[in-house]
Image (cartoon, helix red, strand yellow):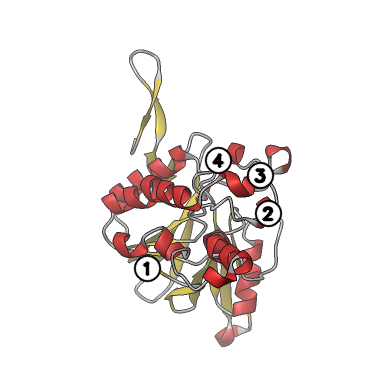
Amino acid sequence: MKRIVVLPDVQAPLEDGRMVRNWVNFVKDFKPDEIIGIGDTCDFTAPSRWNKDTKGEFENDVFEQAEYTKRKVLKPTREVFDGKFGILRSNHGDRPRDYLRKYAPALSKTEMFDEAKLLDYEGLEINDLGDFYDFTDGWTATHGHLGFSASRYAGGAAMAAARRIGKSVVMGHVHKLGLINESRGYKGSLQTLTGVEVGHFMDINKATYLKHGATNWQPGFTVLYVGSYGDVTPVLVPMASDGSFTVEGQRYGALKRGANGKFTQKVGS
């Protein structure tokens, strides 16, 4: 049995630090065979199209956010996990490069604004997984920004992508945590497709672009169990409001009341 842990959309520095810290401690304890980063690891706020011609275009620094993401997300992960780790291409990851190509094309041939360079994939031994990563037969992981249909239901966009591609899809981008199965065919030709949306680690209070501070997002992540025959069992891991969660009966990041009556965070309780 191969165990893959999916790092969902983090969008640092807009992340919920408790979620990230608890996830890192879980990885340390769980010892997965592989980590797949679904993309949007860093927000790269300044070069977004929403900030064009506003003060936000000048308020944030691409390099500063990249360093923050390495310090708070990628390096802590690498400190507890030295195995196979790759990250998919995503819309937020492409922001610096796309901004340069659009507004400074004479300088766009440099690779310095590619996500792999900004986040030091080489130094951290992280693989650039590109647009799609087939982690086993009949299954692929993708960020989800490449023109797939949207859905108000968790799992719906991934299911639409699975129908279009013809294989089961694990994706992020929509910040939902959901799973949908769909079977088609007859008898010996029966095929079941699965669409998995892997959740997010964002702090909604930091996402000031959200109307009324609310949206149909679900915090959490996903574990993929890949059997010896290539069969995949996706397990969705929802997170509580304090960033705690349960995997295989083990609670991570739960609050524990001490002798002084105050609550402290305990990992693996």
- Disc 1 marks which amino acid? Asn
Q: Tell me the distance, in whole angstroms, between the alpha carbons under discs 3 and 2.
A: 8 Å
- Disc 3 marks which amino acid? Lys
Q: Secondary structure at mark 2?
A: loop
Work out whether residue 196 can be spotted.
no
User: What residue lies at 54% left-to-right and 60% top-to-bottom?
Assistant: 96
Q: Tell me the distance, in whole angstroms, between the alpha carbons under discs 4 and 3.
A: 22 Å
Which quadrant is home to the C terminus? top left
Which quadrant is home to the N terminus? bottom left
Q: Is residue 215 left or right of residue 134?
A: right
Q: Tell me the distance, in whole angstroms, between the alpha carbons under discs 4 and 1.
A: 27 Å
> Residue 154: x and y, percent?
64, 56
> Residue 84: x and y, percent?
31, 65
Q: Tell me the distance, in whole angstroms, between the alpha carbons under discs 2 and 4.
A: 23 Å
Q: Which sits earlier in the primary sequence, circle 4 or circle 3?
A: 3
> Residue 92: x and y, percent?
56, 58
Q: Secondary structure at mark 3?
A: loop
Q: Quadrant of residue 254?
A: top left
Q: Are marks 4 and 1 in contact (CB under 8 Å)?
A: no
- Disc 2 marks which amino acid? Lys
Q: Quadrant of residue 90?
A: bottom right
In the image as oriented, which residue stretches furthest toward the top? 260
Q: Is residue 120 left or right of residue 205?
A: left
Q: Which residue is mark 3?
A: 55
Q: Which residue is mark 4?
A: 203
The image shows residue 50, relative to residue 25, as above or below, that is below
Q: Which residue is mark 1?
A: 127
Q: Which residue is mark 2?
A: 52
- Disc 4 marks which amino acid? Asp
Q: Are marks 2 and 4 in contact (CB under 8 Å)?
A: no
Q: How many marks?
A: 4
